[in-house]
Amino acid sequence: MFLIVAVSLISAVVGDCPPGFRVKGGKCEICPTGSYQPITNGESCWNCPRETFADARGSAVCRKCPVNHFTAQIGSTKFTDCVGPKITLVLCERDDRAKCIGMAESEGPIELPKNLKLRSMKVLSGIWEITKVFSSGSDIVTEVEEGFEGEVPDDADYEITTVNPVVNNVFCYTGTGREYRGSYSKTRYNTTCLNWADVNIGDHNSHRPDNHCRGSEYGKRPWCYADGDVDPRQVECSLPKCVWDEECKSDEVGSGYRGTISTTENGYTCQNWNSNTPHIHYYEQDYQQGIGEHNYCRNPTEDQAARPWCYTTNLFKTWDYCSIPTCDNPSRFQYIAYPWSNDSKFLKTKNKKHKISFLRDSIVFSN
C-alpha cells in the first residue's frame, strides 16, 4: 500500500504534460485553438502553419486543409479559414432534362460522364475553366469567375465536357506574384488593403477599382498599400506561395516548373536566359514562361522539348535536359485542384437516388 502511494506522489510531482499541452510554471497548460504541441513535456504551443488549422484546444497536430485550399495566416482556428475553389453544378440525363442531379459544392476537377449533360453552374469561389465541344468537333476553353451563374440553352450547339479550377495565381502565387490575379486583400499584419484607386502617393497612378494584392516586376511577393503613420505604405500580403511547381514539376512536360535547379542531368551549368554567351538564342524575358535574369531550368515551349532544359555554359554543348523530380501528388497543378477520395455520396432526384463515386480524376454516376 505504501509503495503504491509513494509512486503516485512521485508521478504527481514529476508528472508528464501530454501532447497538446505545454509546461509552464511547473504546470501543464492546454494549448489554445490555432496551435499545437506534438511532444510530451513540450515548452511551447506552436502556431499551425499555413494550409492547416486547429479548431480544438489541446491539439497534438494541426488538421490539413483540403488539397489546394489555403489559410493565408498561420494559427488558423477553423476549417472555413481554408480557402479554395468551389462550384455547384446541375447535371441532367441526356435523354430527359427533367431528371437532374443538383451536385453539392465541388472543388474539381470534373469530367462529365457521357450519359449526363451539364445544365447549369454557379461559381462560388475562384476562377474555373470550362471546355466547350461544338457539334462541328472543335472546342474552346473559356473562363468563368466567382459570382458567375449560367445555364446551357436547350438548343446549344455545344456541350461542356470538363470543368476545372485554376489554382495557381488565384489562391496562391508563383514567382514574385507578378501573374497573381486572385482577390486576396489582407496584408502580412492581417490588415485590409487600401483600394488602389484611393492611393495618391509618389508616381503611383492606378485606377483599379479594387484592393486586391498584386505583384510587380521588382517585388518578392504580392503586395498592396495599407494605412501608414502619415501616408499609405507598401506592405507585403500574407498570400501563400504555390510550392508544387517550385520543388518539383507537376507533369512530365514541366512547362510550369519555376524552381531553381540550374545544372543539367549531365552536369553542365545552365546559361543565363538573358545572355547570348556562349550560345546565341532568341528567348527574351517572359514572366509567363518563367524566363528572366537567371539560369534556372525551364521549358518555355512545350512543342520543342519534352521536359525542362537549358542552354549550357559549355561552348561544345548547346543545350541539355534537366533532371527535375515529378511531384508526388501530380493532381496539384494549375488546373487540377482536388484528389478525390473514394467516398460515395447519394443525391436524390424526383424519381430515384443516384450514387456518386468520387474518384481521383473524375466523378462517376451510377443508378
Image (spheres, rainbow, N blue to C red):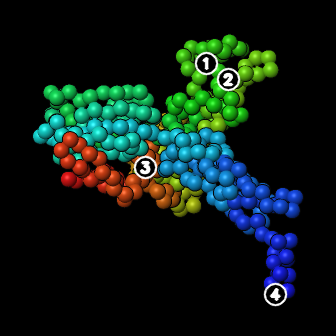
- Residue at 33% from the left image edge and 45% from the top image edge: 110
Task: State yes or no: discs 2 and 3 in contact (Cβ < 8 Å).
Answer: no
Q: Give the distance between the C-alpha atoms of the residues marked 4 and 3, in whole angstroms.
A: 59 Å
Q: Amino acid at mark 3?
A: Tyr
Label 2 or label 3, whichever comes before in sequence order: 2
- 202 and 107: which one is in front? 107
- Place of residue 73 in the rendered image (x, y in percent of width and height, measured from the top left): 64, 41
Foreground tag (1 vs 4): 4
**Residue 274 sits in quarter:** top right
Q: Please give left or right for residue 225 compared with residue 69 in the image.
A: right
- 44 and 32: which one is in front? 32
Say which residue label 3 marks: 338
Task: State yes or no: discs 1 and 3 in contact (Cβ < 8 Å).
Answer: no
Q: Amino acid at mark 4?
A: Met
Task: State yes or no: discs 1 and 2 in contact (Cβ < 8 Å).
Answer: yes
Q: Give the distance between the C-alpha atoms of the residues marked 2 and 4, in whole angstroms.
A: 71 Å
Label 1 or label 3, whichever comes before in sequence order: 1
Does residue 286 appear anywhere in the picture? no
- Residue at 21% from the left image edge and 36% from the top image edge: 159
Say which residue label 4 marks: 1
Foreground tag (4 vs 3): 4
Say which residue label 1 marks: 196
Q: Which mark is residue 225?
A: 2
**Residue 90 sits in quarter:** top left
- Residue at 59% from the left image edge and 22% from the top image edge: 211
Foreground tag (1 vs 3): 3
Q: Secondary structure at mark 3?
A: loop
- Residue at 54% from the left image edge and 41% from the top image edge: 80
User: Circle 3: is it few (<14), some (14-19), or many (20+) Cα within 10 Å?
Assistant: many
